[in-house]
Amino acid sequence: MTLGDDSETGTEDWARTRDYLQNDPTKWNSLSWIAARTLIESVNDVLGRGTQGLVENLRAHWTKKDEPLTIPASEVSRFLVIGDTGEQDPSQYVVAPALARAAEQAGFVLVLSDVIYPSGNVNDYVDGFYKPYRSNRVPDLKAPLDVRDNFSLPENVPVYAMPGNHDWYDGLYGFAHQFLYAADAPPTWPSDLLAPSFDEPLGRWQLIRDRFGRIMWRTPSEPAGRAAPARWGEPAPGGDPAPEATLQPAPYFVIEAEHVDLVCIDTGIDGTIDGAQLDWLSSLSGEKPKILMTGKPLFVNGERRKGVVAGRPGETVYDVVTDRKHRYVATVGGDTHNFQLYDPTTPDSSRDGLWHIVSGGGGAYTHATHPIRTAASDARTDLRFRPTRIFPGSAESLAYFAQQLVPSIWRLLLTVVMFGGGVVLGRWLAETGWSRQLQLGDQVVRVGPGGAAIAAMIVLMLLHLMPQRPGHSHFVRRLLLRLEALVVGVLATLFLHHYLPDAAGALLVLFGASTLWICLNAWCVRWSRWWSPVERVPGWHHVAFACVLAALVVLALLPMGLDAGGSDDGRTVSWVLVVAVDLYAVVAIVGWRKRIVTTVNGARAARWLERSVVWAVLAQTAVVSGEMLRVMSGEGLTVLFLSGLLGLVPLAVIAVVVLAAVLAPDFLTRRLHEEPVRRAQAWIRWRRRLVQPLVFLVAPVTLVLWWWIADAVDSEWMRAAFALPALIVVTVIGMLVVDWVRREHERLYMPLLVVAVLALGVLLLGAAVPGLLDVPGFSAPGQVANELRTWWPAVAVGAAFFTVIAIGAAVLLAHLVFLGAYLLVADPKAWVSPRYRQGAATHFDFISEAAATAIIDAEQEGQAAQVESVDRRTRRRAQIAFPGLNPPFGPIQKFVSEIYSLDEPPFFKHFLEFETSPTEAVVKIHRVRGDQPVEIEEVARISLTVAADEGRFVLGQ
């Protein structure tokens, strides 16, 4: 490894980053991809993928028609490329000082995809672009000058950018402000482009998705606060700052460097380009070699993705790039947050003569690399390719993410166990009738277990909302979460005993038996690895599978058999359970057979793998539902069970009204079909004035009407059907309100949240403890609390809440069993999650890199990870973090990178340095870990010499 001059200063970057952000914190502080706030901001991802032509029309709007799509840089032979930067947290800022030092010798910096997370908001550019890279342009910073100067690129080094999918979540409006328009001539949002074209033929489902996406598209924010001043250049001595000129002509363009052309394309939200961009790409000619820069890489994770062209089936970006007449020598893509190199001179890596590079580790969370296949590709197919280099390395990735994941799995298991303990404790409290008298002035109230549990939950939640204390907050918050799970279990059981006293015991037994059964299924699936395609199965495996399946079937039918002997409890619907068990057996047998294939990547295996988990879950759900119906019929609750399923009816009513509203503007403007401009304007007006308000109001209005009709006709099934839709609507509205308060009134957010918790908690406490809120002269709180105790909509929502919690706990426990979490009971090292501290000798001791390497090598060769040199506990930890190369991984493992995005070293960030000459382009990677010297290593020498041979261009030697 070759280290550059940065090795001495790189270790100081983390200290500078910490000091900088302590003095000048960012709005997002620590961006989490599992937080509701982030997901709400990114909702246009789902909406945009359903629209037809919206992204293409917006791209055409932002592309200047009267300017060439070129950026001259004829004297530049050295430049930097950094991908996926803008998370606005320490993982981005720690890279900035090294980038600034490297930029002193560069002609420009190119940001490769996703400039700003989570949604490209124009007001996030201060924290996500200017503060880390142009700190000299941001006024009123509090950090010392010697600290913030490290976060400023040289003023003579321009920064160009290619939008990623996250930049498109606001229609590229924020991106246009910063890169496509001058500071003194900002763009305006083209709201008229949200109107459809009307003449484009769409299928029924495509039409619905398109109209819904256009109507609900989240309108971008306008610049506010410091967003506008940050666009101005560095102040001249004694003068006013000069406005920054337009940086680039469009979202896609060509940078004409001295020895190579960088062809930068815009892949929108879903990785496609439009026909106009393809025509432009195909028209590029010239003698100079080209490197394709793309937001979505063509080679990634061992797979080839050709780059689809919207509206042109069969035409791809890959076809243009591999056509030798266009003289491409390499492709570089972002989006995936690690480094991957596919070297055409290495067998099985790249078979098209081009270098392919993935470089998306400039600031966003790091994508794990250990699931990437690095073993030799299968000679029977060209669908798998072997990366020559990756960063972080496979073993390093497995060791790091296992250290984060495995202790979290243990803590999740403890949380579920605490919930189960709460259920048992709640059952005991309900049966013993525990209570205590409490003297409140002249008044005596009796506090039962429900009141005590609610009071405990109020205290725990208030403690949870307290500001974090560095060094102590992790332990305290984890302890609070376990205690909250215990209290929720108690409350769920007490709620059940209070409102269904006669059926509570049978329902708790049903819950326990169903949970045990699905956990046993998860255990069998885990150790049989039936989802993994194989070429042959030993005969004894078939016998073992048949025995296990028979045992599970018997176990599912056993409760019915025990009740059948002379029982007169009214359970008469056993046939439902029998049918469900038959379905379960068929799915299991078909799945077991379908995985036996003749080729590793057989089409049958691929189709089964896509559907197997869904089918298995549905089959198990059918069995559990059949047992629920059997048990509840004997308790006289069959109507309640069926009416609970009828909760889909209000949701269906809401869906029908939303569908009608979405299609209404088309109907209301059809008289203008011969005047497309006027029709589009009228469609936009109907969207803003009628449809958007109606879509937001239809759910609460429908539920209010449902509530009124249920009271009017005194219908028990309508009341039961009200529960689940009401819970969903209340949750969604609550999330939206909290997000709005957090964005618009940040200072009031925490005080209002505390007040809301106290107010709701006191009302629930008053409902659980009669007379507690009966204050002389002020009876309103007591009356509200008393009404809350018997008001059926509140009871229905509470029942739905606790039911969802119970089902979620059972499913989570089954998933943890599938992961093998129960084995951690005998592994004390997995009980703690040691924080990495600078200077620690071997922070990978949880799973050493040597052990991780041995485990991955065994898995890559298609064998079980039974490695003699690795002890059993280490293998168990690795198997939890890395069950294998084939799905299913489960949500925790699938999104391990997003969940465990940490804001402290070690980081696995990087950017690339290109140095070109007439004959070759030398590519160096700058690895930034935060706590170690910046590593600079040459990773590729790309030949720029091409020669004509019978009309084809061949890479020179």
Image (spheres, grey):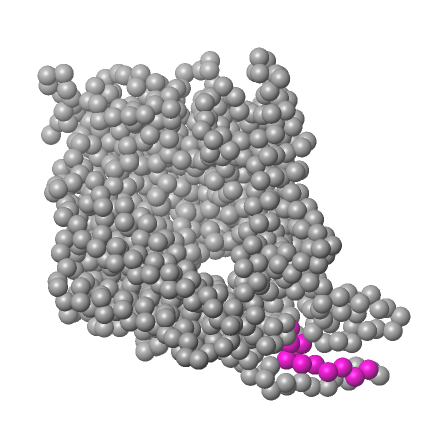
Say which of 556 and 454 sits in front. 556
Q: Is residue 238 above or below residue 39?
A: above
Instruction: Please name the residue shown 61% across and 73% down the image.
Output: 500
How many numbered circles are shown? 0
Q: Quadrant of residue 82?
A: top left
In percent of width and height, residue 69 lies at 40, 19
Range of magenta residues: 443-454
- Magenta-drawn stretch contains 344: no
Q: Is residue 723 left or right of residue 109?
A: right
Q: Is residue 669 above or below residue 783?
A: above
- Magenta-drawn stretch contains 450: yes
In percent of width and height, residue 334 lies at 35, 39
Q: Is residue 410 above or below residue 183?
A: below
Would residue 610 be seen by someone viewing this image from the given angle?
Answer: yes
Instruction: Please name the residue shown 48% across and 63% down the image.
Output: 808
Q: Quadrant of the C terminus?
A: top left
Question: Which residue is outermost to the right?
Answer: 777
Q: Is residue 362 above or below residue 232?
A: below
In percent of width and height, residue 655 lies at 57, 42
Say which of 483 and 82 sits in front. 483
Q: Is residue 264 left or right of residue 703?
A: left
Would residue 878 be seen by someone viewing this image from the given angle?
Answer: no
Instruction: Please name the residue shown 32% across and 31% down the image.
Output: 307
In percent of width and height, residue 395 lies at 24, 58
Instruction: Please name the residue shown 53% across and 56% down the image.
Output: 645
Say which of 445 and 707 sits in front. 707
